[in-house]
Amino acid sequence: ERELAALATRAGDDQQRARIAIARFDNSVVWTGQDALRILDEAERTITAPGWRDELAARRLAALSNTRGPQAVVEAAEGLLDRATGSALAFACMPAAHSLARCGRIHAALDTAARGLAAQRATSRPVTWYPWWHAVTRCSALRCAGHFHEAEAAAEAHYRDAVDVGSTEAQAVFATVLAQDVGERGRVQTAARRAQEAVVLHRQLGRPLLARIDHHCRALALALAGEADAAAAELAALDALGIPPLAQDEIDIVQARGWAAVAAGDLPRARDHFERAIERGESIGDLVGQASALHALARVGHASQASERLAAVAAQIEGELALARAAHVEALAHGDAAGLEKASRSFEAMGADLLAAEAAADGAVARRRAGEMRAAAAAERRTA
């Protein structure tokens, strides 16, 4: 950074200044994400060429994703995605697609990921980030909608390709992607192993920002496995990185802390974490994170509190997952055994096996309370 900053003071034209600013920005994003907006502000004061200003505006979307969250990115991206071309469009589509998905606009997110990949393949100007990052944002959008089978198939294919060609960076990233759906799908041992693989590789590569995602995925997997001490240790390792909260994944990390508290038997603390995640999701427009946190709050005993709010949020999110979450919570709040069983089947159809089993277990409780012992036993078998 010191060397790049010194070069910036001697740059003679817009192209040189922009390329140095982009290199400084990418360097800051790799390490902590701090100073990214300052670097862009400095560059934009002196660069006037429209094409290079679009390159900087594309990077600003990534900085906004870290500092202000998905709604701010979507608002800032509207004009840029209409006018940008080439490498500027290719880069802009990465934070834009991720943010559109978190705002519940799944179709737009998938379209944007496809546009970004096409733009990157067509441009002759090098783009720092690999083309497969567009597959990462596509997988994220698919998961947000509940298309878990499709997301897994895509991530597995990229992971195998990475191993075959010896791309450590792609291997690490897609190992992370394969661990990220543990909260809905379960398979906690597999997810914990994938996340550990990604942690090791990202640390070898010097990618602490990506390692923090791996730590929270592993913490969540361990918490859901009931390994409270191991989950707490993983969260401590995340904190030891010394990276301040980033808006793009803060809600997911807070929820991991909540499930670690559940594993430790501290339900009041878990409730505090989930309520904090809900509030943060509302403040930054992260509807997907908000829906997940409301669902979590209901699952630890507060379905009546969460039901109406979750229904309103889910109505704004495209895809099956959010609607299934809302249906589960509404049935849970009313002790509706048939509704719980229907929610279980909806979760199962999309591949969210952990949520399917949990809804089936809730249905068994409701059947037993109603004195329907045979139906309760059937629900318990389904849960197992």
Image: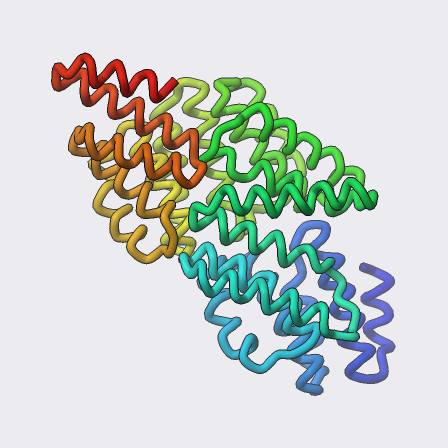
Residue 212 sits above or below residue 55 on the image? above
Q: Position of residue 99 (x, y in %)?
A: 50, 59
Q: Where is residue 238 in the image (x, y as percent from the top left)?
A: 62, 35
Residue depicted at 79% across the width and 75% down the height: 124
Quadrant containing the N terminus is: bottom right
Is 172 positioned to the left or the right of 305 in the image? right
Q: Can residue 295 be seen in this view?
A: yes
Is 187 positioned to the left or the right of 370 in the image? right
Residue depicted at 33% across the width and 34% down the height: 345
Residue depicted at 52% across the width and 66% down the height: 111
Is 317 positioned to the left or the right of 301 in the image? right
Residue depicted at 35% across the width and 47% down the height: 322
Q: In which quarter of the image is residue 264?
A: top left
Count of numbered tags: 0
Residue 160 sits above or below residue 366 on the image? below
Residue 70 sits above or below residue 363 on the image? below
Between 273 and 180, which is closer to the camera in this rendering?
Answer: 180
Q: Position of residue 245 (x, y in %)?
A: 55, 46
Residue 86 sits above or below residue 29 on the image? below
Between 154 and 290, which is closer to the camera in this rendering?
Answer: 154
Q: Position of residue 46 (x, y in %)?
A: 72, 82
Q: Can residue 206 be seen in this view?
A: no
- Which residue is situated farthest in the bottom direction here? 49
Quadrant containing the C terminus is: top left
Q: Quadrant of residue 56?
A: bottom right
Display colour scheme: rainbow
